[in-house]
């Protein structure tokens, strides 16, 4: 998952992201390290937060644009 890459590009801390998404920082850390996988609803919230597609977030495409 590109979560860490996106977060660092936007200069958002794990804590800030967690607070903005109403989650805890430990969950963000585990998603970034691969210890835990986000559920579908969480993937959508993260993708929406960074304004990218879920496919981009999951590294299924290199195109960050949302295809609507």
Image (tube, rainbow, N blue to C red):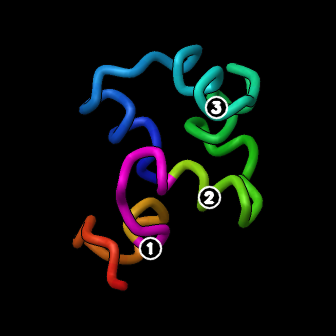
Q: Position of residue 62 (x, y in %)?
A: 24, 70
Answer with mark 1 or mark 2, whichever residue precedes in sequence: 2
Q: Position of residue 25 (x, y in %)?
A: 68, 20
- For the magenta stretch, what is the residue range? 47-55
Kindly identify which residue carries mark 3. 28
Q: CA distance from mark 2 to mark 3?
A: 11 Å
Relative to 33, residue 62 above or below: below
Q: Residues within 10 Å of mark 2 (few under 14, many from 20)?
A: some
Q: Would residue 9 appear left or right of 37 to someone viewing this image?
A: left
Q: CA distance from mark 1 to mark 2?
A: 10 Å
Kindly identify which residue carries mark 2. 43
Tell me the mark number nearer the camera, choosing from 2 and 3. Answer: 2
Answer with mark 2 or mark 3, whichever residue precedes in sequence: 3
Q: Position of residue 49 (x, y in %)?
A: 47, 45
Q: Where, quadrant-wise, is the C terminus in this rendering?
A: bottom left
Question: Is 61 included in the stretch rendered in magenta?
Answer: no
Rendering quarter of residue 63: bottom left
Rendering quarter of residue 39: bottom right
Q: Position of residue 36 (x, y in %)?
A: 75, 45
The structure residue drawn at horizontal position 41% and vertical position 50%, both measured from the top left corner, is 2
Kindly identify which residue carries mark 1. 55
């Amino acid at each position: 998952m590109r979560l860490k890459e996106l977060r660092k590009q936007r200069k958002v801390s794990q804590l800030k992201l967690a607070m903005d998404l109403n989650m805890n920082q430990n969950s963000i850390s585990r998603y970034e390290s691969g210890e835990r996988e986000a559920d579908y609803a969480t993937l959508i919230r993260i993708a929406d937060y960074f304004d990218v597609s879920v496919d981009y977030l999951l590294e299924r495409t290199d195109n960050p644009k949302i295809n609507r």
